[in-house]
Image (tube, helix red, strand yellow):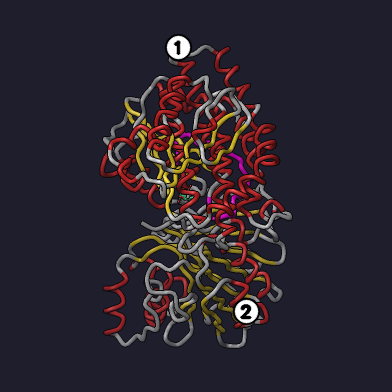
């Protein structure tokens, strides 16, 4: 949700700075800009609407010259997408330039009083109050650091801010309150970024700012301070284990496809997570008075998947709540455990739920992909899933990996509760370990037919995605993929729910996808087939995703995707992967912006 890049060096930085926001585009991509100082008494700002390469071409961002600068790629929250609303924003005299990620919730009252004092605003953004506040407090203190801290004290809400000033051209100031911000410590330069991708090509050494901290960064040093006391705090340097190559497309036309193809490895990595870490969370769940599962968007569906896994293998029912509704539903005390899922570890809704629960004394376990993220550092038990960078805005491999990890925790809980034996657990794990090879086979052998079907049905405006049991969250997540990447309406629903209302819509013009379990899940299989019969009786269209079991009545399906048979613990993953591909190819047929769908951003750090 907006990307910040800042660099201070002994050399010209414009190309690196532009590269930084290009690598952060998945956080927001409606407009972007750069503020650069060439040390000659002014700050040059260039910005416009469009993705980084378009704006670079229009405005010549990478042709600018300077050794200290900040840049921003925007996902509009306050104010339309316009050149004026694009960051960086300047103070009246142009002596302070700022970029910001997050939301300043009291900006209206701040803006009103600044306007009364004579400050002229050029944008509708909340951000623009920051350079004006800096100007105001600098006039009072004649000290950039004091002005910065006084300005920060006025702000309510969430922020990651980077600022350059004409009065100290050898420094970048930056601050964090809830929105992510990290420093990169390089050889000839130091960096600031919303995440590692801003600078991973240049350095792997980073320092993660915590809420309430600010930093003063020069080309050869950095100091992190506490906002309240303005005193230095000791910070650890973290070595990033991802490398720049992992964040590149590697020959695939889109990151989404690359990341779908990386799922076998993501599963291998998830299965390789230390069993002590899995056991720790399973034990905490076993001892808790109440365990909640939470996530939002895809991770809510992952949590729902986990809910079925906990009921199936752990024989414990855990409520699953979408993070944005958590405060409206959950009852928390010191015996509560939250199991939170998040790819980025920075999602506002999830972090907000966790802060609330922690205040009430609950414990938090987290499964997170991004190393050093807020969630991974605030949780009591944290599992880093090790899926590697997920650049496409649409989550695929991170979600699959989390589903595997939750299944492992659920099975471990089953062992602790005496519901399954260690031997049974090992046997189930062995079946999950068969997945990477089988997925590879599905990717190789089913892509062609999925592409053909996507082309054939790309004009369909509405789909119903149906599944029963653990195939219900598969249907929900598959439908979300279709909505977000192809902009085609798809509704996930329990297949058994159909007859309670929605069936009234079924006619020959109605299109459904049915996720059919393996035949050995007898009851689930029969009930799902029953729902398909109900659709066929009304001449509705059914695309069936089913397994290569013997004697499935293929006549019931208008189209089908037949997947290799697998043990029930592993089978749902294959269906989800096939549905991801179906959504991807539909998006291609409709010429959608696959890696950066309209109106979306990778990491939603606002309420
Ligand atoms: C969907 C998607 C979003 C995220 C959601 C939570 O493909 O990516 O629905 O799953 O915004 O994000 P994280 O997992 O970063 O907390």
Q: Which mark is residue 169?
A: none
- First in sequence, mark 1 or 2: give its number: 2
Frontmost residue, 550 versus 214:
550
The answer to whether residue 508 is above or below residue 114 is above
Q: Report the residue marked by disc 2.
A: 61
Whether residue 154 is visible here, answered yes or no, is: yes
Residue 251 falls left or right of residue 432:
right
Q: Residues within 10 Å of mark 1 (few under 14, many from 20)?
A: few
Give the SS element for disc 2: helix
Where is residue 371 drawn, in percent x and y?
57, 46
Residue 382 colored in magenta in the image: yes
The answer to whether residue 520 is above or below residue 217 is above
Frontmost residue, 136 versus 577:
577
Seen at 51% across and 77% down, the residue is 49
Residue 582 colored in magenta in the image: no
Residue range highlighted in magenta:
379-394
Question: Distance between the Cα atoms at labels 1 and 2?
Answer: 63 Å
Where is residue 447 drawn, in percent x and y?
65, 45
Residue 314 falls left or right of residue 41:
left
**Magenta stretch mostly in which secondary structure?**
loop
The answer to whether residue 597 is above or below residue 390 is below
Image quadrant occupied by the C terminus:
bottom left
Query: Which picture quadrant has residue 292?
Result: top left
Where is residue 105 drawn, in percent x and y?
32, 65
Where is residue 485 drawn, in percent x and y?
52, 55
Seen at 43% across and 29% down, the residue is 528
Q: Report the residue marked by disc 1.
A: 418
Ligand 1 neighbours mark 2 (CB distance < 8 Å): no
Frontmost residue, 134 versus 605:
605
Give the SS element for disc 1: loop
């Amino acid at each position: 949700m907006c990307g910040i890049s800042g660099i201070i060096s002994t050399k010209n930085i414009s190309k690196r700075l532009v590269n930084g926001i290009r690598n952060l585009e998945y956080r927001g991509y409606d407009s972007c800009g750069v503020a650069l100082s060439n040390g000659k008494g002014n700050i040059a700002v260039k910005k416009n609407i469009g993705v980084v390469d378009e704006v670079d071409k229009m405005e010549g961002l990478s042709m600018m010259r300077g050794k200290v600068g900040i840049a921003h790629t925007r996902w509009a929250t306050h104010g339309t997408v316009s050149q004026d609303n694009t960051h960086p924003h300047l103070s009246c005299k142009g002596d302070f330039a700022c970029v910001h990620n997050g939301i300043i919730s009291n900006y209206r009252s701040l803006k009103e009083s600044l306007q009364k004092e004579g400050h002229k605003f050029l944008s509708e953004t909340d951000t623009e109050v920051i350079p004006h506040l800096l100007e105001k407090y600098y006039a009072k203190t004649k000290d950039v650091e004091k002005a910065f801290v006084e300005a920060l004290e006025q702000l309510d809400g969430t922020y990651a801010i980077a600022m350059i000033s004409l009065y100290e051209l050898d420094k970048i100031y930056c601050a964090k309150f809830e929105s992510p911000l990290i420093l990169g410590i390089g050889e000839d330069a130091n960096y600031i970024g919303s995440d590692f991708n801003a600078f991973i090509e240049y350095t792997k050494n980073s320092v993660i700012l915590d809420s309430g901290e600010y930093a003063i960064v020069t080309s050869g040093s950095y100091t992190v301070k506490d906002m309240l006391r303005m005193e230095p705090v000791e910070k650890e340097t973290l070595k990033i284990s991802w490398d720049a190559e992992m964040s590149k497309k590697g020959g695939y036309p889109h990151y989404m496809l690359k990341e779908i193809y990386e799922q076998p490895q993501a599963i291998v990595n998830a299965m390789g997570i230390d069993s002590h870490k899995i056991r720790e969370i399973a034990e905490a769940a076993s001892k808790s008075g109440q365990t909640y599962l939470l996530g939002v968007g895809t991770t809510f569906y992952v949590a729902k998947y986990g809910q079925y896994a906990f009921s199936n293998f752990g024989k414990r029912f855990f409520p699953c709540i979408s993070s944005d509704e958590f405060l409206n539903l959950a009852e928390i005390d010191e015996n509560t455990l939250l199991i939170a899922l998040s790819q980025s570890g920075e999602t506002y809704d999830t972090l907000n739920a966790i802060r609330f629960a922690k205040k009430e004394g609950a414990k938090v376990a987290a499964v997170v992909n991004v190393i050093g993220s807020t969630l991974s550092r605030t949780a009591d038990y944290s599992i880093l899933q090790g899926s590697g960078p997920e650049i496409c805005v649409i989550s695929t491999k991170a979600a699959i990996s989390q589903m595997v990890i939750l299944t492992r925790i659920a099975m471990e809980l089953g062992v602790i509760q005496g519901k399954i034996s260690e031997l049974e657990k090992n046997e189930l794990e062995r079946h999950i370990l068969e997945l990477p090879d089988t997925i590879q086979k599905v990717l190789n052998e089913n892509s062609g037919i999925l592409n053909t079907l996507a082309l054939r049905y790309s004009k369909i405006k509405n789909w119903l995605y149906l599944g029963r049991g653990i195939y219900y969250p598969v249907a929900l997540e598959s439908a979300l993929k279709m909505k977000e990447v192809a902009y085609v309406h798809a509704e996930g629903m329990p297949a058994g729910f159909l007859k309670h209302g929605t069936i009234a819509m079924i006619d020959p013009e109605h299109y459904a996808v049915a996720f059919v379990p393996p035949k050995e899940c007898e009851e689930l299989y029969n009930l799902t087939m029953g729902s398909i019969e109900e659709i066929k009786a009304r001449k509705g269209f059914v695309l069936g995703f089913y397994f290569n079991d013997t004697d499935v009545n293929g006549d019931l399906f208008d189209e089908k995707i037949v997947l290799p048979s697998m043990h029930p613990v592993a089978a749902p993953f294959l269906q989800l992967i096939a549905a991801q591909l179906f959504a991807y190819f539909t998006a291609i047929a409709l010429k959608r912006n696959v890696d950066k769908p309209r109106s979306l951003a990778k990491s939603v750090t606002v309420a």
